[in-house]
Amino acid sequence: MEGIIGYGAYIPRNRIKVEEIAKVWGADAPSYKRGLMLEEKSVPSPDQDTITMSVEASKNALKRAKIDPADIGALYIGSESHPYAVKPSGTVVAEALGVTPEAHTADFEFACKAGTEGMFVALNLVKAGVIKFGMGIGADTSQGAPGDALEYSAAAGAAAFIFGRDKIVAKIVDTYAYMTDTPDFWRREYQYYPQHGGRFTGEPAYFKHVTGAARGIMQNNDMKPEDFNYVIFHQPNGKFPLRVGKMLGFKKEQIEPGWLVNKLGNTYSGSSPLGLAATLDIAKPGDMLLLVSYGSGAGSDAFIFKVTDRIEEVRNLAPLTRDLLDKNKNYLEYGEYAKFRRKIRKAD
Amino acid sequence: MSTPSRYWREIPQRYRLEANKCNRCKLIFFPPRLLCPECKNRDLEKTKLAEKGEVITYTIIRVPPAQFSDQAPYAVGIIELKDGVNLTGQIVDCAFDDIKIGMKVKLEFRKLFEQGHAGILCYGYKFVPD
Ligand SMILES: [Zn+2]
């Protein structure tokens, strides 16, 4: 049987509060906090990007998997903030981990779904017997335009998963994908900030695809919401995952362990993978988990996992996701944040 | 400014902290060399440096080399790693007032500098509080 043999998270230390952003743009912080169910978000340091966070999350995954990195046959990174326009992120990460040279690597892009795409492909290559171990990473240091609603949520973080056949901590029961062409969010070449379709990002985009994928995989496996201990949805803001859970018939208690967004923000490709890492941190042997990502453009990947006895052995071999989220925080003022995120134009 | 080829040659040290261990006197040294700097022995094996250590001394750089100009002021420390090797590197994610001699630190993979607006991105290790 195949599944996750190791997982790891990484969240930068810096945070900025919704109030601090709202103050600069003359916006009403309480209504943003209520409307988006967000309090603060993570911010990368100037020397952190998708590559550096992927390395740190992957090293945590390797601590739990306890395998020789050279045995990893495929490494995929999903991100919409790959540092280079042309040149893979995966080669740097693979080299830093000691995975090179006998491995396949690719950088995935599908807005916030890119992380689970990498997981989907790595896992299914293991299932097909093509590789012994595969790694899927979701990471982003996303940017919202200054003053735009996205600026309150666009955050940074990474999660990495190693898949294999033996010593698994969560068995894969099934995978499923659901997608259509839906232009709800995009960024053209050479544009610095993305654009979005406002309210159009809701019903025909996020809700349609997340419910489509969740219902599809449950139907294929003859399962109902009450058959799952926990469910993890993509978290563009606090409200969407709670509302889509309710639409599907899940209870708040099933969603909460993986619901990090109120203190983390939207980590894009890292969002639902970090939620899965946080849920594995508290899951018990035998627990059933449903993971449903979402990426604008638009589509969702769904996974059903069954947690094994081994979870108890590996859990404390690397930092827990909630500890990365809640400990050692460094709060930024907007000026520092704008400098860190290169929102200030300097002389050449 | 270092060229892409020079950066590339140093990848094993910069990314994976590959060092040498002398099979005669057991010294671990970094960066790797052909001869043990202690006993001149050539029988060496490849090893990796420890990822944790303690600050021996540090300074704040206010007038940096050109490729670090965007980063100044920043802290640079000499760290004694758990395997006894001393390594120089930036100490980040920490206010200058909070850096203390004897402070426990660990290595994290970071972007070291960028070769201008259009050149390559150079990665490697920095120290953060443990
Ligand atoms: Zn020697």
Image: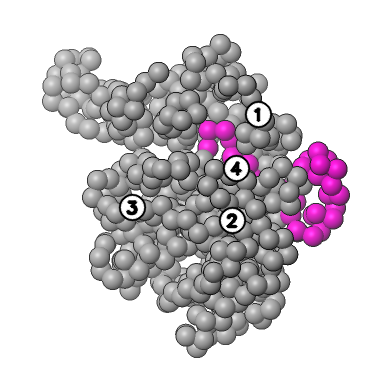
Q: Crowding near pointer 3: few (<14 within 10 Å), some, many (20+)? A: many
Q: Chain of mark 2?
A: A
Please tell me whether mark 2 sits on a helix, a strand or a loop.
Answer: strand
User: Residue visible at 22% across and 14% down?
Assistant: B38
Q: Give the side of residue B117 with respect to residue B95, left or right.
A: left
Mark identifier at residue A27:
none
Looking at the picture, how far across and down is residue B2, in whole percent?
37, 21
Q: What stretch of residues is rendered in magenta?
A: A19-48
Q: Do the dots labelled 1 and 2 sit on one chain?
A: yes
Examine the rendered structure and indicate whether residue B55 appears above or below residue A276: above
Mark identifier at residue A345:
1
Q: Is residue A286 visible?
A: yes
Marks 1 and 2, how far apart at CA: 24 Å
On the image, numbered disc 3 is attached to which residue?
Answer: A105
Quadrant of the image for the N terminus of chain A? bottom left
Marks 2 and 3, how far apart at CA: 25 Å
Marks 3 and 4, how far apart at CA: 26 Å
